[in-house]
Image (spheres, rainbow, N blue to C red):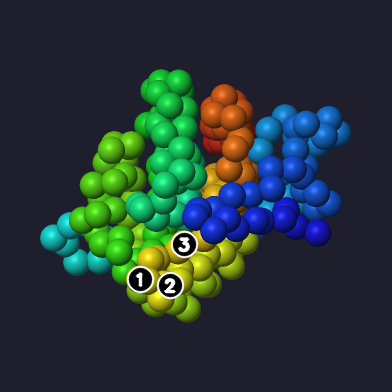
Amino acid sequence: MLPVVLLAGACGSDDATGSAGTATAEEGDGATDLVGVVRDDPLDVSTVTLPEEAPGEAPTLFTTTAAPGELLLVYFGYTSCPDVCPTTLSDVKAVLADLGDDADRIDLAMVTVDPERDTAEVLDGYLDHFLDRYHVLRTTDTAQLDAAETAFGASSSVTTGADGRVEVSHTGTLYAVDDTGTVLVEWPFGTPRDAVANDLAILLERLDAAAGA
């Protein structure tokens, strides 16, 4: 069984507990010293390719894999999110500050689940508030977004009520991906920022050890 994902009406959230098919540091089974969710059979997102957009520029294709020796954080969200998205990105900002020079080896890609309202300009301005280095991923192709979400075990929905009010639900998980496109750790919403910082430091150490082997 995979981790249960809960969707909230206003924004996304997750069940932060581990389940069969996953291992977490809290389980104390010696399988990992990471705090986030680590699957026995890690997700492979190396074939996920989405348009990367920047204001005033033609879209280019971006594959959700990290650069060699780095980690890529991937997040599905939207700029009008009132709680989960800004909290998650604020946590990432604080974590990168804690990592010091190692923060230069952490990249982030945000996939909007609300592409009709999240233009390239809106997304770029939003992410620039939190980070210096990021990728704006946006597609209006529903099938393409669905395929990307499925690969990450994520989901979302956007509905418009009779009064014109837009309601968005989405998975609130933050994913750490390596240069092979393997999801190394998943942090459900609510994971303490010091736990994320701990895990990133460990993952970078492991990358260095593997490179020197």
- Which residue lies most toward the right here? 29
Residue at x-position 30% and y-position 60% = 118
Residue 185 screen position, x and y as percent: 62, 43
Give left or right: position of 53 versus 42: left
Of the residues shown, which amino acid type is indicated by label 1? Gly
Residue 22 screen position, x and y as percent: 77, 48
Q: Quadrant of the C terminus?
A: top right
Q: Nearer the viewer, residue 193 or 116?
A: 116
> Are the residues at dot 1 and dot 2 in contact (C-beta closer than 8 Å)?
yes
Query: Distance of mark 1 from mark 2, alpha carbons?
Result: 5 Å
Q: Earlier in the sequence, mark 3 or mark 2?
A: 2
Q: Nearer the viewer, residue 74 or 118?
A: 118
Query: Distance of mark 3 from mark 1, alpha carbons?
Result: 13 Å
Q: Which mark is residue 168?
A: 3
Give left or right: position of 36 versus 23: left
Q: Nearer the viewer, mark 3 or mark 1?
A: 1
Q: Which residue in the structure is indicated by mark 2?
A: 161
Q: From the viewer's perspective, is residue 166 above or below residue 71?
A: below
Q: Which mark is residue 164?
A: 1
Mark 2 neighbour density, 10 Å: few (under 14) some (14–19) many (20 or more): few
> Are the residues at dot 3 and dot 1 in contact (C-beta closer than 8 Å)?
no
Q: From the viewer's perspective, is residue 48 above or below residue 41?
A: below
Q: Is residue 75 visible?
A: yes
Of the residues shown, which amino acid type is indicated by label 3? Val
Q: Nearer the viewer, mark 3 or mark 2?
A: 2
Residue 131 screen position, x and y as percent: 32, 37
